[in-house]
Image (cartoon, rainbow, N blue to C red):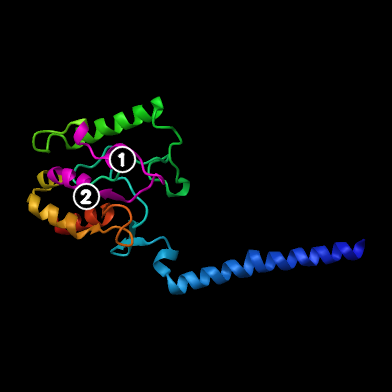
Amino acid sequence: MLKDLITSARGMLLVTLLCGVLYPLLVTGIGQVAFPGNANGQQVFVGGRLVGSKIIGQAFTDAKGNPLPQYFQTRPSGTTPADNAAATSFANYGPNSTVTEKAIAANISAYIALNGRYYPGGLTPAKVPVDAADTSASGVDPDISVRNARIQAYRIAAVRHLSLAKVRHLISTYTSGRGLGFSGEPGVDVLELNLALNRLS
């Protein structure tokens, strides 16, 4: 009996050492050497200061949570607080849920309030892109659709006193293609786009 307990304890310690210590250290080391950017969250630095991540959306708002009109805005976030990378989640409500309906209606209203007066002819709910009305699966999507960015371009051009053509050129510069050339839709990197706007200013 005692011999069995000792053998079991030794086996447990060995497995813990291999799987709980050595293997994670090995994988972490390989990641740091082979893919340092991905292993560290694809952090973005400006002047030595961390300003965000390429793979996590962030809010461009004032201290009260109001969107800053001089910046492109990401899609609505499904986390609490908004764009919380430590708690990525999505609303687990069906498309017929009144909670979903109210959330989407609120997002559409906020989008129109922010961009409507700058958009030629005004914005209606039918013109609001899906990614401006609903959250992504992760709740922290860093990209927006090209259509979303082109609607916001009118506001950015007006507020920053830039030509619409210049803003559209920046959108094209920071638009990535489909995954593997065929998967998904092209996306616009909001953080990189806003940093480029800051450099212009």
Count neighbours of disc 2 (C-alpha within 10 A) and say few if under 14, some if 14 to 19, many if 20 or more.
many
Q: Secondary structure at mark 2?
A: helix
**Label 2 is placed on what type of residue?**
Val
Q: Is residue 119 above or below residue 169?
A: above
Count neighbours of disc 1 (C-alpha within 10 A) and say few if under 14, some if 14 to 19, many if 20 or more.
few
- Closer to us: mark 2 or mark 1? 2
Q: 161 or 77, which is in the foreground?
A: 77
What x and y, as percent, mark residue 136? 37, 44
Q: Is residue 73 left or right of residue 33?
A: left
- Residue at 62% x, 70% y: name it: 22
- Residue at 31% x, 45% y: name it: 59
Quarter of the rendering occupied by the N terminus: bottom right
**Label 1 is placed on what type of residue?**
Ala
Looking at this view, name the residue that lies furthest to the right. 1
Residue 20 falls in which quadrant of the image? bottom right
In this rendering, does residue 62 appear at all?
no
The stretch of residues the image draws in magenta is 126-155
Quarter of the rendering occupied by the C terminus: bottom left
Q: Is residue 89 left or right of residue 142?
A: right
Residue corresponding to mark 1 = 63
Residue 147 included in the magenta stretch of the image:
yes
Residue 119 included in the magenta stretch of the image:
no
- Residue at 22% x, 44% y: name it: 148
Which numbered tag is attached to residue 146? 2
Q: 25 or 65, which is in the foreground?
A: 25
Q: 40 or 96, which is in the foreground?
A: 96
In this rendering, does residue 194 appear at all?
yes
